[in-house]
Amino acid sequence: MALGRQVLRIGIGGPVGSGKTALIEALVPALIERGRTPAVITNDIYTQEDAEHVRRTLAGVLDPARVVGVETGSCPHTAVRDDPTMNLAVGAEMLDEHPDVDTLIFESGGDNLTLTFSPALVDLFLFVLDTAEGEKMPRKRGPGITECDLLVINKIDIAQYVRCDLDVMASDADRVRSGRPVALTDCLSGTGIDDVLDHLESRRADLLPAG
């Protein structure tokens, strides 16, 4: 079954530890507050760790049945970009079981700067960097950074402690992305999450037919 076009399908990728899961855990309650009905599909190579973490963190906010973990058994690139068959199948099952879902989030296991998502799987994707990786990261480019719909620079609260010049990092991100959108966030405090949500809602209006 094809995933419904009235469902906004969002991919979230980025290096290990950048804050992909934290971003999801900040976005989900904020989406619900805005009247949206999200569900989450995580991808780990061998475990359900990310899915279990999301269920625990969002207990009482999101029905645990609306969080499913995919064990890819291989590089995350394969499961979200090269052959997204498993994720498409799990997404279709999620929508069959929960037809009210209007926002389906796919999280890739942490990987490198070449990670992108198949357009057969998602309508748009976010790529997450964090300041602890160093202000140089945007200058490394890679399709994850340059091709994502929205680049998220996370952990802005610790930039000063990890010798990261946030102004330089944000400026370099703007330059290598030719002005395409960049959001600065601290997912644990919620800083910047409204900016991410506003962008997603504007893209929903662009990508999905009215109704």
Image (spheres, helix red, strand yellow):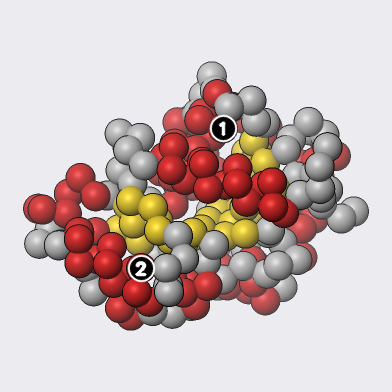
Q: Residues within 10 Å of mark 1 (few under 14, many from 20)?
A: some
Marks 1 and 2 sit apart, C-alpha to C-alpha, by 26 Å
Dividing the picture into quarters, in which one does residue 82 lie?
bottom right
**What residue is at 43 percent from the left and 43 percent from the top?**
195
As drawn, the label of residue 174 is 2
Compare residues 8 and 54 and report the one nearer the observer.
8
Front-most of residues 177 and 28? 177
Against 27, residue 70 (above or below) is below
Where's residue 198, x and y in %?
52, 41
What residue is rendered at 28% in x and 62% in y?
A: 170
Q: Is residue 134 left or right of residue 200?
A: left
The residue lying furthest to the top in this view is 60
What x and y, as percent, mark residue 127? 46, 62
Residue 110 in view here: no
What residue would you read off at disc 1? 31
Secondary element under disc 2, as helix, strand or loop, is helix
